[in-house]
């Protein structure tokens, strides 16, 4: 009972001793030429120093992205001046602008086509959460509804300085990764994002069951007759049902959230 | 359509309304801009008459208004739900518009104006897409901004978004139950979407879109070789389409047989949001239309609202507006020159030179407005604040020293360039008459020899005080479209020099004066409470247009006397200039189509709105 617990840091130090730099004997004549470091450091340093963004502009933010790449702000300082139009050759997708429903299948497809390691930077208010156009019927409220995002840059549009700050954050993220744990060298870790489809409104193939639960709840005939005639035929399910249906939906959402918490 | 016809026309008698062949059903409000109500079956005769006899050869704007639930007195006695609205101008005579309203009941058709004005093509498709009005005789009536199979026509008043709160802003409360509720949490799928009841995603099949490129001639000539034409798709993610634009081309070898623009990939529902907003709330949204030229967009919108309300703009503010608009024009034109060259293969170098000057001008914008790109600087009746101390000095340095030199430099580097000449001369030709009938405006028609510039034809602001020319070039090809932008930028510098020299002191905003002048009519009816925040224009409509750097930028606003516009429509030059893309590209090589598009100079934020 009273035995002292082993001092793990000390044991670790002992085990590490043979690998630590001090114990590696570098011949005198090579002292000035050899640099000893970790593999992670080299790997990450080389990745972050030539991170090629996808040449991919969506809206207003793309103009600031171009300005960032141009001579005054000069992305070349960070090894990022080579913008690749092909997703196959690029490491970083800067989602620069409003993501619309019509565009999002293309974006997801491009994301799927990028080779790993890949990073996504959501530039500006629209790409982050819909921005000033969030309520619009053709606007996706944030690209993270569909693909994973690494760094968000706020602003409408973000100034070039803000974008550079965001890019440096991506670099920081890269620097913190370890070659031992990164998903792209592991089995069954990378997955494709299912491409959303354009139906009566855009839908995510992952949510088909969820959508069916709502749309197929009542027989179609009854609901059409209830809201009546011309309007029901032309407008979407949102408007008039909001009062009656939204309450049920909100209850459902609350129940879901409660279940998640539990 | 030609000048001779106008000249030979007999001395006109009576009002225009009496001369219209089909007669009119009535007029709209007399207080604001007057419009004639025309029956749907006589609209074709009316348009033909106006074009051929009265010289109104330019169909500037075609849009639609949904009057369901409209309570104003203007619609008394009219039972039809929709009005299709036409704005016609004359490129020969200049001056104001002829405005026509065609009342249309729900689910009815209107004859397509494309037979008289081919430029109605894209605009009618937009009306069909957003309002569901069918145009009889339209060559290619399918959805344009949304996709085939979209549920409903979203600009109708009874169509509500998934994130719908209330019909109009400001909302009564953002925190009805004491805390903010996110819309995402209210919908089970957590996204901005709605689905019709009874819709089954499993059994659903995407409708097959009919694309006219597939109906294009399969061969250019009689086939002397056994070749096949193929359809090539460019975009929406393509480095040469300047954003999220898509072109479908049918090519034989490398020669284009047909080209069809596809858009809507940046359709941000500007107009639907604009109808929910109050008047002032729309100002920052206009920045995001043509996001290179936020200042000109602001002006177009401010102009339309001032026309509607009658707010006077003080002298100093008018000068500031001119200065900002002309700086914006230089920004736009140098940028577009850079990117035309980019499309020609001079990758980045000319664009970098252009961006260098642009940054200088953006610094000035940032100083006055606080933002580089989205300035939101104009207000109804003036500008939001006065110029900061020392600003004029910097602006004068730019206008007098730096910019003329920069433009000379661009000229010297590029204009004699062999590749630009070889690729630009004679490519993308379309005659001036065709361009006008396609409703093309701005530098595009001036590069075809038509000296039509709204700053001269229907002067707004204080443009009539400055000494400047409208440069024109005769050839209507890519080279001229490149060069006209350089010439126009030089004229802008000329205007800037004069404006910066002559700018008077005084007030920069006429809204307070307007508010006190309308006090007698009851503060709160015209200007809302709280320091005039909620502007309430009188019932009626107005169409304000400015010569934007890309062409005629118009704002059509219809008011029912409430703090929110009943209808808010943007006549976007980029969008309508794309009418000419197909006709201009046919017969040239695929690589030329990229430059032809570049020389139209589009910005997708304005194309799709």
Image (spheres, coloured by chain):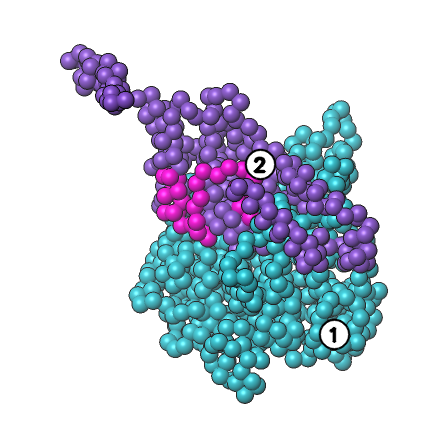
Chain colours: A purple, B cyan
Q: Nearer the viewer, residue A165 or B530?
A: B530
Residue at 44% over, 55% down: B373
The number of numbered discs placed on residues in the rendered structure image is 2
Q: Position of residue B323 (x, y in %)?
A: 43, 65
Q: Which mark is residue B75?
A: 1
Q: Position of residue B477 (x, y in %)?
A: 59, 47
In space, the residues marked 1 and 2 are separated at their CA atoms by 47 Å
- Label 2 belongs to which residue? A108
Q: Chain of mark 1?
A: B
Residue farthest along the front direction in this orientation:
A1
Residue at 51% over, 57% down: B180
Residue at 57% over, 36% down: A108
Q: Quadrant of residue B550?
A: bottom right
Q: Nearer the viewer, residue A228 or B214?
A: A228
B42 drawn magenta: no
Are the residues at dot 1 and dot 2 in contact (C-beta closer than 8 Å)? Answer: no
A149 drawn magenta: yes
Residue farthest along the left direction in this orientation:
A28
Q: Is residue A33 left or right of residue A167?
A: left
Q: Quadrant of residue B216?
A: top right
Mark 1 vs mark 2, foreground winner is: 2
Q: Nearer the viewer, residue A125 or B427?
A: A125
Query: Are the residues under marks 1 and 2 on the same chain?
Result: no
Residue at 70% over, 62% down: B157
Q: Look at the picture and state if B311 lies above or below B258.
A: below
Q: Which residues are magenta?
A: A141-169
* Residue B370 seen by the camera: yes
Q: Provide the secondary structure element on which disc 1 rests.
A: helix
Q: Provide the secondary structure element on which disc 2 rests.
A: helix
Q: Residues within 10 Å of mark 2 (few under 14, many from 20)?
A: some
* Residue A66 seen by the camera: no
């Amino acid at each position: 009972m009273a035995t002292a617990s082993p001092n793990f840091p000390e044991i670790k130090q002992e085990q590490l001793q043979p690998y630590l730099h001090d114990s590696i004997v570098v011949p005198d004549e090579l002292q000035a030429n050899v640099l000893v470091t970790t593999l992670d450091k080299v790997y990450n340093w080389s990745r972050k120093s030539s991170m090629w963004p996808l040449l991919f502009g969506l809206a207003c933010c793309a103009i600031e992205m171009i300005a960032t790449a141009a001579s005054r702000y000069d992305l070349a300082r960070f090894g990022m001046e080579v913008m690749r139009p092909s997703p196959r050759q690029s490491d970083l997708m800067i989602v620069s602008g409003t993501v619309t429903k019509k565009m999002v299948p293309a974006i997801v497809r491009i994301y799927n086509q990028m080779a790993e390691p890949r990073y996504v930077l959501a530039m500006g208010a629209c790409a982050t959460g819909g921005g000033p156009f969030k309520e619009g019927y053709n606007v996706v409220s944030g690209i993270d509804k569909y693909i994973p995002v690494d760094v968000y840059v706020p602003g409408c549009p973000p100034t070039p300085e803000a974008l550079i700050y965001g890019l440096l954050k991506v670099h920081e993220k890269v620097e913190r990764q370890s070659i031992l744990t990164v998903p792209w060298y592991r089995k069954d870790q990378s997955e494709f994002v299912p491409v959303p489809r354009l139906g009566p409104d855009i839908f995510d193939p992952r949510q088909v069951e969820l959508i069916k639960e709502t749309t197929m709840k009542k027989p179609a005939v009854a609901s059409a007759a209830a809201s009546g005639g011309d309007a029901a035929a032309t407008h979407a399910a949102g408007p008039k049902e909001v009062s009656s249906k939204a309450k049920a939906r909100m209850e459902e959402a609350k129940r879901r959230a409660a279940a998640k918490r539990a | 359509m030609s000048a001779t016809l106008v000249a030979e026309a007999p001395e006109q008698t009576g009002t225009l309304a009496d001369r219209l062949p089909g007669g009119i059903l009535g007029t709209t409000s007399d207080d604001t801009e007057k419009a004639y109500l025309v029956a749907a079956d006589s609209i074709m005769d009316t348009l033909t008459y106006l074009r051929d006899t009265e010289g109104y050869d330019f169909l500037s704007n075609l849009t639609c208004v949904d009057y369901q639930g409209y309570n104003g007195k203007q619609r008394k006695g009219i039972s039809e739900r929709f009005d299709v609205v036409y704005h016609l101008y004359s490129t020969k005579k200049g001056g104001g518009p002829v405005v026509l309203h065609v009342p249309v009941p729900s689910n009815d058709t209107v004859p397509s104006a494309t037979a008289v004005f081919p430029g109605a093509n894209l605009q009618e498709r937009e009306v069909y897409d957003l309002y569901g009005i069918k145009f009889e005789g339209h060559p290619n009536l399918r959805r344009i901004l949304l996709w085939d199979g979209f549920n409903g026509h979203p600009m109708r008043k009874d169509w509500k978004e998934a994130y719908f709160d209330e019909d109009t802003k400001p909302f009564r409360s953002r925190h009805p139950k004491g805390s903010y509720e996110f819309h995402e949490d209210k919908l089970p799928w957590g996204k901005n979407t709605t689905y019709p009841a009874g819709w089954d995603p499993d059994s659903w099949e995407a409708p097959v879109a009919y694309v006219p490129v597939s109906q294009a001639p399969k061969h250019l000539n009689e086939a002397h070789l056994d070749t096949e034409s193929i359809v090539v798709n460019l975009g929406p993610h393509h480095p040469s389409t300047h954003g999220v634009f898509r072109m479908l081309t049918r090519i034989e070898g490398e020669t284009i047989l047909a080209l069809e623009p596809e858009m809507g990939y940046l359709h941000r529902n500007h107009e639907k949001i604009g109808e929910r907003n109050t008047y002032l709330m729309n100002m920052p949204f206009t920045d995001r239309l043509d996001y290179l030229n936020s200042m000109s967009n602001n002006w177009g919108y401010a102009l339309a609202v001032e026309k509607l309300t009658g707010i006077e703009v003080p002298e100093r503010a008018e000068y500031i507006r001119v200065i900002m608009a002309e700086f914006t024009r230089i920004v736009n034109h140098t940028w577009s020159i850079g990117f035309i060259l980019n499309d020609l293969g001079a990758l980045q170098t000319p664009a970098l030179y252009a961006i260098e000057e642009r940054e200088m001008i953006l610094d000035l914008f940032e100083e006055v407005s606080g933002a580089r790109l989205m300035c939101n600087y104009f207000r109804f009746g003036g500008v939001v604040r006065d110029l900061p101390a020392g600003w004029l000095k910097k602006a004068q340095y730019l206008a007098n020293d730096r910019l003329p030199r920069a433009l000379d430099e661009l000229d010297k580097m590029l204009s004699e360039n062999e590749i630009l000449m070889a690729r630009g001369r004679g490519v993308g030709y379309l005659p001036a008459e065709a361009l006008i009938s396609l409703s093309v405006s701005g530098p595009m028609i001036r590069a075809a020899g038509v000296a039509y510039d709204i700053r001269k034809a229907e002067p707004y602001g204080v443009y009539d005080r400055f000494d400047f020319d409208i440069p024109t070039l005769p050839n209507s090809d890519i080279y001229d479209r490149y060069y006209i932008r350089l010439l126009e930028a030089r004229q802008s510098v000329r205007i800037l020099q004069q404006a910066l020299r002559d700018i008077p002191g005084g007030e920069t905003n006429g809204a307070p004066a307007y508010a006190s002048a309308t006090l007698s009519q009851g503060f709160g009816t015209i200007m809302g409470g709280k320091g005039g925040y909620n502007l309430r224009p009188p019932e009626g409509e107005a169409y304000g247009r400015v010569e934007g750097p890309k062409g005629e930028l118009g704002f059509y606003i219809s008011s029912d006397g409430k703090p929110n516009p009943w209808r808010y429509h943007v006549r976007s030059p980029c969008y309508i200039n794309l009418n000419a893309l197909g006709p201009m590209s046919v017969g040239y090589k695929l690589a030329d189509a990229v430059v032809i598009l570049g020389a139209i100079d589009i910005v997708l934020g304005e194309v799709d709105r």
